[in-house]
Structure formats: C-alpha cells, structure tokens
Image (cartoon, rainbow, N blue to C red):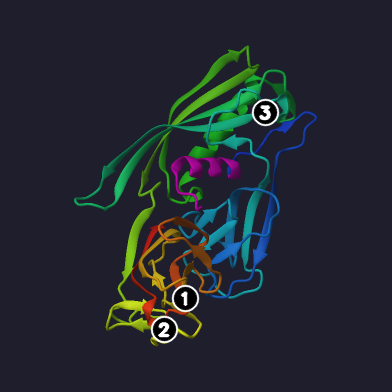
Amino acid sequence: MNLIKPEDILVEFFRAYVPEVKRDGLDNRQTTNSESFNGDTSKKTFIINESNEILAINSITVDGTTKNKYVEYAIDLDNKLITFVTAPGAGSDNVVISYEIGSNWIYPDKPRKNLTESKYPRISVLTLDQGENPLGVGFGGPYWMDGIYQIDVVAYKEQKCLINGEIKEGQDVADFIGRNLINQLTKGTLSRIGLKLYTPRILRDIPLPLDEEKNQFRRMIEVQFNAQDIGKQNTAAFLETFETENNKGESVTANWNTSNSRLEMHSSSNQQQAYNTKATNSGLNSGGQNFITVTVTADETIFATDQVIYQVSTDNSSWQEATLGTELTLTTPGDILYWRVIFIGNGANATYIENLTHTYTLS
C-alpha cells in the first residue's frame, strides 16, 4: 500500500537521509542501490526488480530532473511500486530510481526488549498526538493537521562505533545520531519530504539516563509538524445501473441490457447451450489519484449452477478476482479502474446482475 500516514512518511524520510554509523566488527545494515527504466509517455507504474527488502526511496529522476517525493509519484514499499502522477516521457534508461535496501534499524514503534547488541543503534518513531482542523465549511473539504512525534535514538552501552575518525560508544553515539537527525529535519525538509509535512519544530531534545537493565543510552527528540490532507484515503463509489452504454467497454459478449437495466449472460433464452461471456467497462478515471482498494457488490439472479466472476484491474490487462462484499487490495495501484464480469453456464438471459457497485479508496 502507498505510504500515506505521517509516521510512515517520517520513518521513510529518516531511512533515506540519516546515515548509519560504522559499528566496530559489524557490517552496515543499509546499502544503496538503483535501477533504470525506459519511459514511454504512457506507463505510470514501475516495479523495482529487487530481491531484498526496500527500506526507502532516496530519489527519482526523469531525464535528469529530480521529482518531488509524494507529490509527483507515490511509493509502495511493500510491493516495490512507484506510481507517477504523470507518465515519464519516452527515453532509454531515462527513469532512475535510487533506493535503500537491507535490514531495518529505523522503525515506527518502540524497540523490543530482547534485542541483542548487534541490533543497535536504533531509531524509533512514535505518534504522541494528532489533531485535525477543517480549512473550510462543509463535509469532505481539506483539513489542517498538527502532529507531535517522539523520536528515540537508542545506543548500546559498550558498543563501539567509528564517528568522525574516533571510537565512540553509549551516549556519545546516541547524541551524534540525534544531532544528525535534527540536522536532516531542519535542512531542506520541505522539498525532500514531498510537501507532506511542514514546518518541523523541535519541542524537546534531551539525553536520558542509562537504562541499567537494558544497557541502553537514549536520546529523546520531540518534533511537531503541520500537514494538509495527509494520512487519510478518500473513499468513493461508482454504481453501474446498465441504463445506458456510456461506460461500456470493448469486446463485450454478454448482453448489456439497457431496456431492463441489467447485464445478462446472453440475450438468448436458450438454456440448452453452454455460454462463456464477458463484459467490461471503458475505465473509471480517478483524476490523478491512485485506486488502492476496491469492494464489489451486485444484485445477482443465477440460473441453476451458473457462475458469475468479478475481476478488477488498473491496466486493463492484469486482472484480480474479487469476492462480492470483500475489500480487495490492488496489487498495482493506478488512476484508472477497469472491471470485468464473466458469465459461465447455461442460463442465457435468466442469469444476470443489476446495480454493480465498486466502492474504492484513493490515495
């Protein structure tokens, strides 16, 4: 799923811009990799061909121009997807994605209590408070959010790290990473965090006493951000009544019956014949946002053991099967939603659906 929550965006920002210190006797947990793609003026979604877990996107350039993170493209780390608002122009290797891979050391939660020394240092991000205020009158308008987040930098008591050519440990390590973290937050954050989180304000920045039981030194930082229209997905629905053919797709073999406002397996009443028919729509355009989830519902009339199969797609070629009434997460988010209904059986015009509804979330 695309990153939309403020705390997830903040964690991804730190993974991209806060470098890991060199630990004595241990390899770094993160490394940088990149991949190039060919733009073609129409393709918006690119899948990063990476076998390792992707932790963050460092930058994306198209024809040498750096694109604004979260504004000109959406990030789905789980599925290794980048979805552009506007398709990159045609070119050879003109889309370059730089990203971080490896194992996490920055998390949107508290560190576990049973971690070994090799898991340190670590950074955790916790949400302390989030409030929302509408910017206008009426339901569904834009809103302004204030969020306060606690960032804990945790270092192990006797773990040695190389910092600026010197061996440091404990509180010195936590303090160094904390200062670097604040520096990244206050140095050009607006452009690098994609215009999602505004005006970072450091509310607290304090070292905490040694936790003898856990052998941990910690530096706690509280930061406040403003944000507009972030952390929520828009939900909407489209009802196809089959009263017109305005949304009818191509190569439809089922009967789009506008007279009776329904989609039938076939126009014939002959139930001695086997049918395998389908219908598609012409595409539901979101206006630039990505379809993230879809829930399909319909009123069915089924003859005997006939089957009705529902599928959805964002590219009109790779289809996911949907179960009526169950939310489906799209494997490839995109800004156009296609649906397909397949009829299998002998029912002819006695098997049909009415009021086909797609309820969806956008991000």
72 or 113: nearer the eye?
A: 113
* Amino acid type for the residue under numbered disc 3: Tyr
Q: Amino acid at mark 1?
A: Phe
Type of the residue with mark 2: His
Q: Secondary structure at mark 3?
A: loop
Image check: 78 left or right of 193?
right
Q: CA distance from mark 1 to mark 3?
A: 57 Å
Mark 1, residue position? 343
Q: Nearer the viewer, mark 1 or mark 3?
A: 1
Compare residues 186 and 113 and report the one nearer the observer. 113
Q: Are marks 1 and 3 in contact (CB under 8 Å)?
A: no
Taking the spot 70% from the left edge, 39% from the top edge, the residue there is 29
Figure check: 277 above or below 167: below
Earlier-in-chain disc, 2 versus 1: 2
Mark 2–mark 1 Cα distance, whole angstroms, equals 9 Å
Residue that label 2 marks: 266
Q: Which image quadrant for residue 107?
A: top right
Name the quarter where the C terminus is drawn.
bottom left
In the picture as drawn, the residue positioned furthest to the top comes out as 212
Mark 2 element type: loop
Q: Is residue 331 magenta?
A: no
> Could you say where residue 338 lies in the image, as x and y percent from the top left?
45, 71
In the rendered structure, the answer to whether residue 241 lies left or right of residue 204 reads left
Mark sitting on residue 120: 3
**Main SS of residues in magenta:** helix
Front tag of 2 and 3:
2
Task: Provide the residue span drawn in magenta.
Answer: 1-16
Contact, CB < 8 Å: mark 2 with mark 1? yes
Q: Is residue 12 magenta?
A: yes
Mark 1 / mark 3, whichever is N-terminal: 3
Residue 90: horizontal and vertical position, in percent? 58, 75
Compared to residue 25, the image places residue 158 above or below, namely above
